Image (cartoon, grey):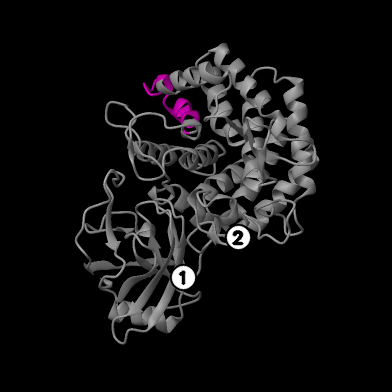
Amino acid sequence: MSDLTYLVGRVVSARKMSLPESMRLSRGWHAFPVVPHSAPTLLHWDSTSELPLNERPRLRLSVALASQEDILLEAISLANGRVIARFDIRHAHAFQPFEVLLSAQAARDILTEGLGLRLVQGDAPLWLLHDPDSDAEPALMPHVLISTSSDRLQAFRYRLNSLASLQPFGWQAGCVLDGLLDMAEAGLLESDLALRTLRAHFAHFFDSDGNLDYEDDSGRPQNGINGTAYTLPFAVLVRTQPDHPALKVAIRFWHEARAVSSVVQDGNVISAEESYTTAYPMAQIGVLRNEPSLVAMALEQLRARRPLFTGDSLALSLHSDGTRTFINWARAAAWYLLGLVRTLAIVPNPPADLREAFAQAAQWAVRRQNKQGVWHAFVDAPEVQPDNGSSAGIAAALALGVKAGLLSSAMREPAVRAAQALSAALTPDGFLTGVAQADKGNEALQRDDYRVISQFGMGLLAQLYAALT
């Protein structure tokens, strides 16, 4: 047995039903439902070997279709009906794994008896990834993880450089794609293997002719750009496939959006997220394709978002009536800082006003880093649990700023402290824990202490590791 063993379960009994209308699975993946008010879905395991346990086993299930509900899922013993594990699943996104630590005896019971899955909270079927052909990514299948010992940083590199890090197209995928390419360029991943993984990820988003063909973050098929958050992946696409036909689609989207409101934004709201998801890929395409007008437009987007930062607070959103929302949200800080630093690091002669804006926001963030080296989900609210995903993004921006000569070398130390704290939050097989859920539950979910595994957080951590190299 290797240091990490995925013992994958097979679904032997599940309610036969169609996917929800207008939704589909990402190409090449399969799923099974757990249905409310129905007989449990049954899984069996073929392995009954003795388990050498240095760490507690983990039971994992991964979501196939996004859910907008707060779900409670129970795993029950088939022998006596006792509850073996409970999964708290709130506003989950596709490809998101959920895990429960098991006792050694519970793991043995699952492997010998199998288990049943039943919904005790939730009104709609929960669709989970399955592997009927035994050739899918095991880390995302129903499995018991057995760990005897592991190098967690090495495991992180393996997990990132695989389909286990796949995310829905848009900002989530963009975080992972940036991290993959950054680590390859920093020599932390073998370049050829990383490029192969990048191509495998992009194959989920484009058809064979290079046309967009993906599922949005609600599982609905799309063949166009569905908002500003969906343009982040084009920053890596242009770096790896500079002649890809879809780049023209992104450029057209930006020009059409700018014609409506003079600034590229969704509706009547300017968002800090667009600093990273819009200005940065816009600048990257402009630089690599030698289109100065795109570079100028990217700088324009950054300047339009300067009012989000007042010097003592930073907002995610600025509404047309002047209302600022999600004040001091750590993820907004990550987006604002990453967009500034990644754009300024690649444009010729980065303007002084934006350099100053980045430096001021970076100093503001460092003052709010906690003693453990990370940031609370709302950076001025120590009563709220830290968010490891946003912490990775903020720290990555600091390290990138030092590397690009935009910040003093002293600003590297906070990034190093964050990397050390976040490395301790990796699972034995390299997933990042302690991430605040993707923001479909509005501010209440972000202020809650609910934390998850989420691969976009791994992408941000990969950016941090690469920037510190």
- Where does label 2 land, which residue? 448
At horizontal 58% and vertical 36% (from top left) the residue drawn is 273
Viewer-side residue, 249 vs 155:
249
Q: Where does the magenta region start and end? A: 233-248
Residue 42's place in the image compared with 415, above or below, is below
Magenta stretch contains residue 16:
no
Disc 1, SS = strand
Q: Residue furthest left?
A: 16
Amino acid type shown at disc 1:
Val
At horizontal 50% and vertical 49% (from top left) the residue drawn is 440
Q: Which mark is residue 137?
A: none
126 displayed left or right of 96: left
- Where does label 1 land, which residue? 100
Viewer-side residue, 465 vs 319:
319
The tag earlier along the polypeptide, 1 or 2, is 1
Viewer-side residue, 327 vs 64:
327
**Does the CB distance between marks 1 and 2 fall below 8 Å?**
no
Residue 16's place in the image compared with 467, above or below, is below
Q: Does residue 406 show up?
A: no
At horizontal 32% and vertical 27% (from top left) the residue drawn is 211
What is the tally of numbered marks visible in this picture?
A: 2
Disc 2, SS = loop
At horizontal 56% and vertical 12% (from top left) the residue drawn is 293
